[in-house]
């Protein structure tokens, strides 16, 4: 007789099969998910090295660069009575350059995006954007001279002032700027990945930051004028080698149509150099040295590619300002706009066809009352800087709390499908009132109202 009652060991195989099915992995495609926004929680490693390492590289290479350049000037322009002194200077220049090259190689062989790799990338950037485009252009010039033997090449000044040479030079500069933009975009896409535009914050800036930049740029230009006078007095220039500098080049564009001059010197460098220095170099250096170290080193390299010491130091300081505004706004269009305004004002100042010689009026205001103009400019820049910091764009969680900066490094902002949002902070009313007072004071100095009153 068979009993229908189950014993203590009955049903075990069925239980094992159920447990096995529970432990086996499930195909994600079989799960039903709802389309809801996600919240990113980033767990990031700290930079391998810190701010003081970046300071070390900055001090070392700035000293080497200035030492090498000053020694080279001493060799070319020095009045030596003995060849032995000249040889000592040559040995010193080679030693300084050798030390710099050794440190670059040492840094470049380390893992990650090191400062040495950044220097080599900048060398490649200069070669590709400045020298490679000259090869086809030189070939075209040789062909043109072959079919037009009436052109005289024994007088370079007359040759460069000819209409044909001016048209050729305009085309050459525009071609070089196009190569710069394409090269920067290509390297960014290759190095940063598909989301390069999100990681370098290629996004429309907040209107408040655009207005602040527009107010600050004339004041920043006066500070640049004062700084250039000091630097040109103490630092050597490439003109001592008989090489024209950037100011000479800008002056040579005086007879160009102002639209082409602005496109070649204002728009082109603003896009290409910002994508390279703030975008590509900024992403790489920030991952290793942190934001502050990146500001220092990326700005130094931005100055270094300008080559001439007075302009290099000025570009380095300007690069710090551009990068701080970049971090505050989380939009690369802000440093592009500042770069564009700075270059365009210089071009329109020299242009004989341009409509607005604004830089000339600013320089006149500085020359008439230098201390008053400089103090008014610093007043504007300090208030603008405070408001930029107060209203800096931060990443906010859905519940309204600001996320730590490590969650979105450098200038990165959330995905469109993410619940976290990039929003600016609030601005104190007192800071706005101070900015209005500073702007009115600066405008009175700029347009000479104090000269008429007192």
Image (cartoon, helix red, strand yellow):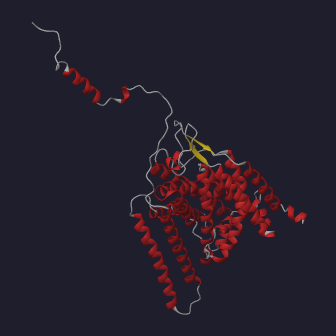
Residue nearer the viewer, 198 or 132: 198
Q: Give the residue at the far top of this rendering.
A: 1
* Residue 192 image point, x, y percent: 47, 50
Residue nearer the viewer, 116 or 240: 116
* Residue 78 image point, x, y percent: 58, 86
Residue nearer the viewer, 410 or 222: 410
Q: Residue at x 57, y 83 (%)?
A: 74
Q: Is residue 26 left or right of residue 223?
A: left
**In the rendered image, which quarter is residue 269 located in?**
bottom right
Q: Give the residue at the far right of this rendering.
A: 453
Q: Residue at x 47, y 65 (%)?
A: 53
Q: Residue at x 69, y 65 (%)?
A: 224
* Residue 273 image point, x, y percent: 57, 57
Q: Is residue 66 left or right of residue 384?
A: left
Q: Quadrant of the N terminus?
A: top left
The answer to whether residue 351 of the structure is visible from this angle is no
């Amino acid at each position: 007789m068979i009993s229908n009652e189950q014993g203590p060991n009955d049903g075990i195989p069925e239980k094992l099969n159920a447990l096995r099915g529970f432990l086996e992995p499930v195909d994600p495609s079989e799960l039903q998910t709802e389309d809801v926004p996600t919240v990113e929680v980033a767990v990031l490693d700290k930079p391998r090295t810190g701010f003081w390492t970046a300071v070390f590289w900055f001090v070392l290479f700035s000293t080497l660069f200035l030492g090498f350049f000053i020694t080279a000037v001493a060799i070319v322009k020095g009045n030596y009575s003995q060849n032995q002194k000249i040889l000592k200077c040559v040995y010193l220049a080679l030693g300084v350059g050798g030390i710099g090259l050794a440190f670059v190689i040492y840094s470049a062989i380390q893992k990650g995006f090191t400062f040495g790799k950044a220097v080599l990338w900048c060398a490649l950037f200069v070669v590709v954007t400045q020298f490679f485009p000259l090869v086809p252009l030189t070939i075209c010039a040789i062909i043109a001279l072959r079919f037009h033997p009436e052109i005289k090449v024994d007088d370079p000044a007359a040759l460069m002032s000819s209409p044909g040479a001016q048209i050729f030079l305009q085309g050459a500069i525009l071609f070089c700027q196009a190569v710069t933009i394409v090269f920067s975009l290509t390297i960014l896409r290759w190095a940063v990945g598909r989301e390069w535009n999100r990681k370098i914050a290629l996004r429309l800036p907040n209107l408040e930051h655009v207005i602040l930049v527009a107010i600050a740029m004339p004041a920043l230009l006066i500070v640049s004028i004062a700084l250039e006078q000091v630097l040109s007095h103490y630092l050597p220039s490439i003109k001592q080698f008989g090489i024209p500098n950037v100011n000479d080049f800008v002056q040579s564009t005086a007879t160009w149509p102002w639209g082409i001059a602005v496109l070649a010197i204002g728009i082109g460098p603003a896009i290409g150099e910002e994508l390279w220095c703030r975008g590509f170099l900024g992403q790489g250096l920030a991952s290793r040295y942190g934001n502050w170290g990146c500001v220092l080193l990326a700005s130094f390299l931005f100055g270094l590619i300008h080559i001439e010491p007075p302009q290099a130091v000025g570009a380095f300081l300007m690069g710090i300002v551009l990068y701080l505004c970049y971090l505050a706004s989380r939009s690369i269009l802000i440093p592009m706009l500042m770069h564009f305004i700075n270059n365009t004002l210089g071009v329109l100042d020299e242009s004989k066809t341009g409509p607005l010689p604004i830089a000339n009026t600013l320089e006149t205001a500085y020359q008439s009352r230098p201390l008053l103009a400089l103090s008014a400019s610093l007043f504007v820049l300090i208030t603008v800087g405070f408001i930029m910091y107060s209203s800096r764009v931060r990443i906010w969680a859905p519940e309204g709390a600001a996320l730590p900066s490590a969650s979105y490094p450098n200038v990165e902002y959330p995905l469109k499908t993410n619940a976290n949002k990039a929003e600016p902070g609030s601005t104190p009313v007192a800071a706005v009132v101070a900015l209005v007072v500073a702007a009115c004071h600066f405008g009175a100095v700029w347009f000479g109202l104090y000269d008429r009153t007192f």
